[in-house]
Image: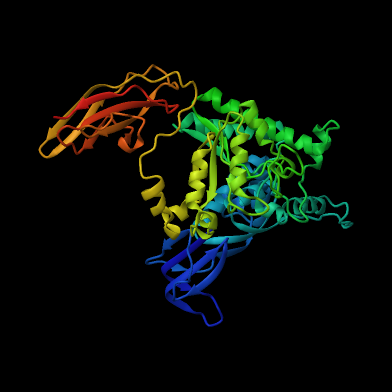
Amino acid sequence: MSILIHNCTAVLMDGANTVLPNAFVAVEDGKITWVGDRRPVGFFDERIDGEGGVLLPGLVNCHTHTAMTAMRGYGDGHDLQDWLDNFIFPVEAKWDDRAIRACTALGLAEMIATGTTCIADMYMHMDAVAQEIAAAGISANLCCGGVLFDPVFDPKTHHDCLQQEHMASRWHGYNNGQILFDPAYQENRDFICKVIKDIVDRYDIDGIHIDDYFYPYPAPGKKIPDDASYRKFADGQNIADWRRKNVDLLIEQLHSTIKEAKPWVRFGVSPFGIWRNKRTDPRGSGSTGLQNYDDLYADVILWAKKGWVDYLAPQLYWSLDTKAAPSRHLAQWWNDNANGADIYIGWDVKRTMDSPDPGNNDRNELDTKVRLSRRLPNVKGNVWWHGYWVTGNYKGAADSLAMKYQSTIALPPAYGDLKKTPKSVSEVKIDKTGEEAFLSWEAPRRGSSESESDVVRYAVYEFFPGEPQDTGDPQTIVALTPFTRVRIYPEPGVTFAVTALDRMNRESHPIFIYYK
């Protein structure tokens, strides 16, 4: 992720106390790579206009007990011992991890809002504190509060020292700051599914999508901290198979949670682009890279066979002929191993536009990748990663897509029982008010409760005189809308058609109207 901040006053906090007006500051993957009064060379994923603002290093809170934010002002006016014995200690005795997390989140929000980016915190329930700090994305130095009343001290047996050792072993540089929900624990799987169910219940969404993080990606010197859960739950099972089973259980439960709440909400995953290599498994692909099955413990193909995912969006972020992971051949492999799931290929826009394609006599790989995906029957579309490179029109990517490959409005692929279609619209008419013309219609009636057949949007087609009235031709779509009225610019002899689409993207029979 690269960010360019411009048009601001930068306070550098250097030895010369430099204040730089109209500054440019570049950030690459969380690190400042450029500060100056000239724009750095290169393309940036995000640009922030700092007009009227002052940019300076974040503040550091060098001594804090963040959770105690909630007790600010409590017991004011009392001497220290009275304040501790009769106010603070009684409250702290009642606090559990849940209370600590809530109070820590409050304190962190306050600090972040006022420019603090790093803290040194010492308190109790530090596992809970660390979880909130990781979620907030703030940097921290942490330790457990240590108290010694006994004149005899042995760090190997003292309770507070043991707590500190435990916290340091769990959190110091842990997984680059990411929190691992060990999927071996049913309560963790339940928690994740509870969050997803809340989203599905409260929002009118089309789908739930999760990325490629199941067990952590392998890292030198980093061990997955699941020894305790393995001893507790594995029952003699091979650790690799056991980890895969844990992820399988989570995926299956996520699928059930979503479908029981709203069957039409799609559930999909964007896995790392290699399931297994052929040298490991004859069913695998002709690649030599990291493997979902063996390294992330994600048996993606099983999930498709079991019907636990509606679609897969494999991340084929390599060039077409990268030796270890040739995306040209991997796209074919995922198509051939779809097992009933729809496939949407994830392409890296920057690498696509940077890589020449001599086989196609082209300066980039865009044309080949689009044509490749369109000739594979189980591939239903492309995912362009990431969006900033498209909206930023990196090397003309957006122009090429808009003018050559995706120039028409597209209907999302239908799914579910395709023999079912929604009811058609009625009362289609054209109204003119002065120079403006509007096409309107009556929506099909809904039932008393939500269902997959509810109409949620409409497609409007326009056919010129003598043109085949084929709603299968996307070039004739002029609007895709959730509303029942659109502005049109009709010419004599034009015919319009309106179709209804339900939650499964299934399309009704068209209703036509002729404009004289």
- Residue 212 lies, in percent from the top left, at 62, 43
Q: Residue furthest left?
A: 434
- Residue 65 lies, in percent from the top left, at 64, 55
Left or right relative to 316: residue 185: right
Left or right relative to 90: residue 505: left
- Which of the pair 309/204 is nearer the observer? 309
Q: What is the quadrant of residue 408 in the picture?
A: top left
Q: What is the quadrant of residue 439 in the picture?
A: top left
Q: Residue furthest bottom?
A: 16
Figure label count: 0
Question: At 42% across and 19% down in the image, what residue appears?
Answer: 449
Residue 342 versus residue 453 in the image, above or below: below
Residue 178 versus residue 335 in the image, above or below: below
Q: Quadrant of the C terminus?
A: top left
Q: How is the protein colored in the picture?
A: rainbow
- Which of the pair 225/398 is nearer the observer? 398
- Residue 13 visible: yes
- Residue 289 lies, in percent from the top left, at 70, 50
- Residue 73 visible: no
Q: Which residue lies furthest to the top in this view?
A: 448
Q: In which quarter of the image is the N terminus?
A: bottom right
- Residue 497 lies, in percent from the top left, at 27, 28
Residue 185 versus residue 151 in the image, above or below: above
- Which of the pair 373/62 is nearer the observer? 373
